[in-house]
């Protein structure tokens, strides 16, 4: 699969301003209860694990980079990209074990990504992307009919439902309940979106969406507020009660996400240091 760059031209029909998150952070308890019910019934838990071979991981990295370009170009919210990646990963897992699913390879991987994005956009956005536009984003390497046909295959294989819930769905809702970080809400919510974007797909298999969402918010809260252990525990207890989570499971997920984020920060810092060293020697 080759990675196509998005062509930034004057065709305004290919780019849409998407509505922003609710800046008032709704505290509607029924919304949270309904999301928690769907999260606890999440169909991804227990799906077979994908082969983490080097070639497949490389293809996945190229595909996600391309999907991120599409998402940024369309000014779409982070939840569309997050949902797309989860759909792709879950389909790869399920298709490798299924009698009916079309196995993913280098020839059809971009088609899987385009179809998954098309599906995620329809679920997450007011103005979803069209199959024709997705085809243009692939430089016409994938036809609109291929995208729509593979979308049906993905939906059938995953037993897909419009009730599909992702960790992103919980972020603003959870942050909205935390009154004592009011001035940092948007900052923490934005950071949490980024955290969920970089965590490994294994989290999706191990933890339900609301657990990942709560833990990512806790990591963001800790990073921006520099809380001591007692204050962090107090916040954790509050969120555990809010979503009725298992304390041990939430603590385990929090430590894993924290370690991943710290590792990413170290890699970023090392990269900056290397660039400075190169620049100073020029």
Image: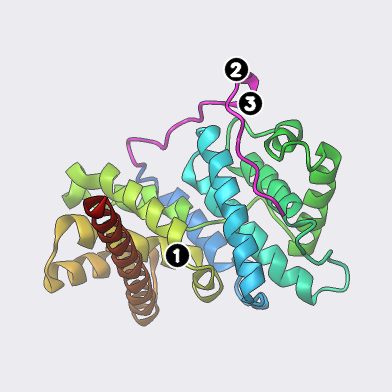
**Local crowd size for mark 1, using a 10 Å CA cut-off: few (<14), some (14–19), many (≥20):** some
Q: Does any portion of residue 164 appear in the rendered image?
A: no
Q: Residue at x 34, y 41 (%)?
A: 25
Residue extending furthest front? 282
Q: Residue at x 65, y 43 (%)?
A: 4
Residue 30, percent from left and from top: 45, 50
Q: Is 240 placed left or right of 213 in the picture? A: left
Residue 65 forms part of the magenta stretch: no
Mark closest to the chain's N terminus, 3 or 1: 3
Residue 179, percent from left and from top: 21, 49
Q: Nearer the viewer, mark 3 or mark 2?
A: 2
Q: Which residue in the structure is indicated by mark 1?
A: 199
Residue 10: mark in rendering: 2
Q: CA distance from mark 3 to mark 1?
A: 30 Å
Residue 14: mark in rendering: 3
At mark 2, the secondary structure is: loop
Figure quadrant of residue 131: top right
Q: Is 228 placed left or right of 211 in the picture? A: left
Against 31, residue 133 (above or below) is: above
Q: Write down the region rendered in magenta.
A: 1-25
**Local crowd size for mark 3, using a 10 Å CA cut-off: few (<14), some (14–19), many (≥20):** some
Q: Nearer the viewer, mark 1 or mark 2?
A: 2
Q: Residue at x 63, y 19 (%)?
A: 11
């Amino acid at each position: 699969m080759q990675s196509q760059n998005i062509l930034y031209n004057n065709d305004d029909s290919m780019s849409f301003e998407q509505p922003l998150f609710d800046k008032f952070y709704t505290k509607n308890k029924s919304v949270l209860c309904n999301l928690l019910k769907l999260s606890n019934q999440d169909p991804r838990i227990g799906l077979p694990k994908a082969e983490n071979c080097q070639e497949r991981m490389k293809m996945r990295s190229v595909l996600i980079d391309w999907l991120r370009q599409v998402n940024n170009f369309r000014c779409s919210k982070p939840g569309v990209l997050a949902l797309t990646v989860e759909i792709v990963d879950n389909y790869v897992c399920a298709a490798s074990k299924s009698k009916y699913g079309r196995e993913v390879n280098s020839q059809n991987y971009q088609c899987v990504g385009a179809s998954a994005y098309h599906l995620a956009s329809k679920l997450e956005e007011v103005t979803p992307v069209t199959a024709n536009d997705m085809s243009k984003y692939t430089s016409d390497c994938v036809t609109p009919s291929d995208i729509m046909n593979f979308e049906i295959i993905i939906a059938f294989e995953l037993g897909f439902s419009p009730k599909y819930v992702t960790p992103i769905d919980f972020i603003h809702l959870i942050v909205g309940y935390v009154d004592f970080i009011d001035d940092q809400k948007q900052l923490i919510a934005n950071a949490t979106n980024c955290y969920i974007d970089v965590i490994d797909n294994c989290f999706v298999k191990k933890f339900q969406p609301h657990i990942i969402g709560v833990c990512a918010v806790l990591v963001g809260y800790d990073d921006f507020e520099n809380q001591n252990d007692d204050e962090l525990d107090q916040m954790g207890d509050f969120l555990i009660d809010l979503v009725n989570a298992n304390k041990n499971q939430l603590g385990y997920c929090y430590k894993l996400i924290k370690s991943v984020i710290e590792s990413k920060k170290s890699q970023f810092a090392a990269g900056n240091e290397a660039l400075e060293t190169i620049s100073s020697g020029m």
